[in-house]
Image: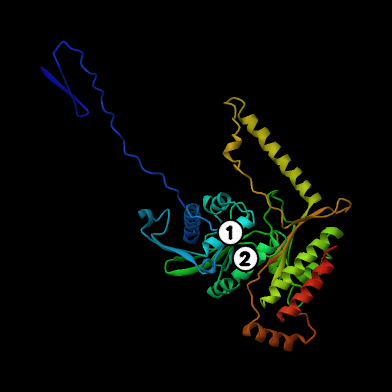
Amino acid sequence: MGLYRQKKKTYSGTCGDDMPEVKKQKKRKAFKIKQKVFRSSDPLLSVFMWGVHHSVSQLTHTTIPPLLLPADFKAFSKVSIENYNFNSDNMVAKFKFKEYCPLVFRDLRERFGVKEHVFNQALSGMEPYYESEGDQAREKGHKHFFSKDNRFVVKLFHSEEVEFMHSILNDYHTYVVEKGAKMLLPQYLAMYRITVSGVEHYMVVMRNVLGNNSGLKMHKQYHLKGSTVDREATDKDKSKTNPRLKDVDFLKDEIKIRIGVDRKKEVIEMLESDVKFLSHLKIMDYSILLGIHNVAQGLEEDAEEDQSSSDDLLEGEENNRDGNDIQPMDVDDYADDEEETYDGFMFVSPEEDPNKEVYFFGLIGILTKYNATKRAAHTAKTMKHGAGAEISTVRPESYAKRFLEFMEKAIL
């Protein structure tokens, strides 16, 4: 009798009996788990991308409570990494990432209509960029960078501003719950601390006031505080491609925000409520960031771009005549599975207006408290320019009153 073994089972029989078929075992090839690569020429951006992805991934496995507790406004999550992937081309070997109040900001993102996968993809799936391209942009004093799709802006700031943000976060969250989308305050979406090479960097993520789903170009930009003292752009600033001008420039250019009587009433009511909230917290020195898209100019630029694209296409067809046909890309290659739309900062001039324009504006810079330093600056500027001068450093109540008067005249 013969014995035949297969997978630890024993079979017996005579030589003439049918023998069980012995299958050859396939060799299993070891495979490497595909990892998401967060690569940037700037180590800070690489760690930022990694941190956002890590944070959002962790929160997807966390039950979001129906009601936030006081402890949630003091909570944080922190991770320390050493020798990440052992590959300095992908990531610095050692870094720390800390997220402040993760459940609170997760709730704020939901209230502002920012989906988690959109937030994650925009900030970790594509490398953010500084306003001026270049590896040394941050070292040259740039205080913020943008997501590749321009939906979000990330501001770098000091530890004192983090402390102040913590102190007002509960009030800010309560105000957002009460007002919903009926506000022009900055939309804070996350706050982090990143440590790279022993240096701590504090940052807050906000929705970009000038970012829009239509991809409209800003033909003019203004940074308005309602003050005229030292509020004119320098010649160096004006020489830039798309300069961000100030109050004096706004008045000299005779700019008006033409949105119609009904929309003006709505906007002024929002501003009055927002400014009252800021004054209550002793906050001043905030401003309106205004972007203006001229429709006629935009259509002209689009026509020129279409003509250029047509010329390039004809040239490509000529070069390809003897070769294979060019296959168009599948829309799924670059289409978002669920497009996020938000137009809360966008306002359009009335149909009857001969100079059709689209305006994007919202409040920025609301983390400056009127403290001893600002009181000293107020005294110094008053002595320099006189008691009646419209200096920017004034008490919160005076700042709010002047700011609202300026915006009342600017909006038609």
**Which residue is at 63% across, 82% downward?**
371
Query: Which of the 4 image quarters holds residue 28?
Result: top left
Residue on which disc 1 sits: 107
Q: In this view, does 6 lie to the left or right of 51?
A: left
In the structure shown, which secondary structural element does the residue marked by tag 2 occupy?
helix
Q: Which mark is residue 61?
A: none
> Vertical placement of 330 versus 199: above or below?
above
Mark 1–mark 2 distance (CA, rounded to whole Å)? 9 Å
Residue on which disc 2 sits: 173
**Which residue is at 64% across, 75% downward?**
368
**Residue most toward the bottom?**
383
> Percent x, y for residue 131?
61, 60
Q: How crowded is mark 2: few (under 14 residues within 10 Å), some or many (20 or more)?
A: some
In the structure shown, which secondary structural element does the residue marked by tag 1 occupy?
helix
- Mark 2 and mark 1 in contact (Cβ < 8 Å)? yes
The residue type indicated by label 1 comes to: Asp
> Vertical placement of 258 versus 331: above or below?
below
> Percent x, y for residue 320?
60, 29
**Residue most toward the left?**
1
- Quarter of the picture containing the C terminus is bottom right
> Vertical placement of 164 versus 101: above or below?
below
Q: Can residue 284 be seen in this view?
A: no
The residue type indicated by label 2 comes to: His
> Percent x, y for residue 404?
79, 71
Q: Can residue 86 be seen in this view?
A: yes
> Percent x, y for residue 323?
57, 26
